[in-house]
Image (tube, grey):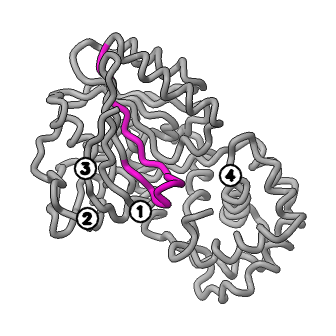
Amino acid sequence: MVECPGSSPLYRVLAAGIAEDPYLLSLARRVRPGQPPSNMLLAAVHHELLFGDTGHELARYYPNIAVRPLAVEGAFTAFRDFCRRFEDPITDLIGRRVVSTNEVQRCACLMPAFRWVASRFAAARLHLIEVGASAGFNLLWDQYAYDYGAAGRIETETAPFVLYCDVRNHQGFGIDLSLPAIGTRMGIDPFAIDVGDPDDRQWLQALVWPEHQERAERLRSLLDWIPSRRPAVIREDGVEAIVRAIRDLGTEGLACVFHSFVLNQFSETAKSSFHARLRSSAAARPVVRIGMEWDREAGAVVLDAEHHHGDKSERTVLATCDAHGRWLDWTGSPSRK
């Protein structure tokens, strides 16, 4: 769990304890294949504290539950006891759920990538296909308002809120680039979240870290705002579903497949197949992939765009950014391969 330091003091303490505890490691490994064990265990415990009638002392360490939370240094003993006492519901949750965090703040990083792609490849219209779309919030990136501080602001009349993001390098950021029209909006996710389902709504809320009150409030606003606007998210799995979606798009417009913190849940074989099939799809039409993922080599979250046309590909690293979209360092340097 690389995001904890400086972002969640409570989860930093708990994650460190989990890593050294044989019982909790065994419990956390009951997740579905490909799921991050510690993240799932923390989310399941948070879910039971928020929505279960536990009455357990662990709640006193959570700043979104307790009025005056206790110091996090003492939380692990209570956490371990909680997991012992409520092992059955925790096991049920981590065995059937996945990390389907739909972090809309990441749109503050994705939005300039879409605008850059539209400008770079002269696309007046984008067809959006999101891999791992969850509830589909990020497919509506063009309907939110953005404040990039000194780099500029983008207003949208119908926006339910403003997303704030610190741009650490303004050069080439392109806040004045025109916004492309959006054609198709389609999400693909075998574990798609139904915002009309109370259990799904609760799981989304449990995935928000306890200290992140602003994220929690924004999520509650979205859950009220999105039902009449939610784009299509189909519950399918596998690369072939993405290929079919590309094939079925209208001919006018650029196909744009995007993902954020999804490929970490793919096996190496699945990742290779995903990239290979996107390249092969470009034989029939140009295809762009936009990704926001943790890059082990860079030691950072990398925002990149990859354009495939025929047998040629061009990848551009656009920025490094915060995992939750709170800042980005724009680079935008292209490389051909």
In the image, taking residue 103 as reference, residue 92 lies left or right, namely right
Q: In which quarter of the image is the N terminus?
A: bottom right
At 44% from the left and 23% from the top, the residue drawn is 278
Q: Mark 2 points at which residue?
A: 167
Cα distance between the residues tagged 2 and 3: 13 Å
Disc 3 or 4, which lies upstream in sequence?
A: 4
Q: Say what secondary structure mark 3 lies in.
A: strand
Residue 153 rendering spot, x and y as whole percentages: 16, 60
**What secondary structure is the stretch in magenta mostly built from?**
strand
> In this rendering, does residue 92 appear at all?
yes
> In this rendering, does residue 143 appear at all?
no
| Residue in front for this viewpoint, 62 or 325 | 325
Which amino acid, by three-letter code, is at mark 4? Pro
Query: How many other residues sit within 10 Å of disc 1, few (<14), some (14-19) or many (≥20)?
Result: many
Residue 170 rendering spot, x and y as whole percentages: 18, 62
Residue 58 lies within the magenta run: no
The magenta stretch is: 285-303
At 21% from the left and 42% from the top, the residue drawn is 116
Disc 3 or 1, which lies upstream in sequence?
A: 1
Q: Mark 1 points at which residue?
A: 322
Cα distance between the residues tagged 3 and 4: 31 Å
Q: Name the residue under label 4.
A: 36
